[in-house]
Amino acid sequence: MSCVFFYGLFMDSSLLSDMGLRPVSLGPALLRGYELRIGARATLVPKPEAVAYGMLIELTDAELSSLYSAPGVGDYRPYNVETERLDDGTAQPALCYNLPADKLGVEFNSEYAKALSALLLRLGFPSSYASEVNPPDL
């Protein structure tokens, strides 16, 4: 099993289950030094003063391979990161799948941002963070 820091719609364990995967949720976490960016989907980009929120979820290597070979996410690559669990503040190493910088693009998927903002609120993340993901003026 691999621990993965999910920060987009894959934070939703029921979505992963509906895809035939068997996610084991380890709870909410944050990742310092990265900022969430919405394009066609979500990705994280380095920004020293930023914080990104997400869920730590365990999946098998085979499940991760299957998940990231699907259309729309095939360009995402795994990186090793050090997250901070929100329940007790302990460090938790994890994989984090991100788009390489040359694949970022400039489009903004407002429907994705709206769905992600609603998911963040449902999972109990700060409302200020959910508002950053989907600003009310868009």
Image: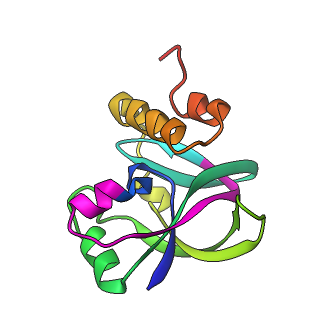
Q: Residue at x 50, y 28 (%)?
A: 134
98 in relation to 47, above or below: below
Quadrant in which residue 103 is drawn: bottom left
Residue found at x 40% / y 53%:
12
Image point (47%, 17%), residue name: 138
Q: Quadrant of residue 119?
A: top left
Does residue 138 appear to the left or right of 41 in the view shown?
A: right
- Seen in the image, is 112 located left or right of residue 121? left
**Camera sees residue 50:** yes
Percent across and percent down for residue 23 are 37, 70
Residue 66 placement, left or right of 37: left
24 in the magenta segment:
yes
> Observer-nearest residue: 75 or 6?
6
- Residue 29, x across and y down, in percent: 64, 59
Q: Nearer the viewer, residue 111 or 105?
A: 111
Asked whether 80 falls inside the magenta stretch, the response is no
Range of the magenta residues?
14-35
| Residue 72 on image: x %, y % | 26, 55
Residue 107 seen in the figure: no
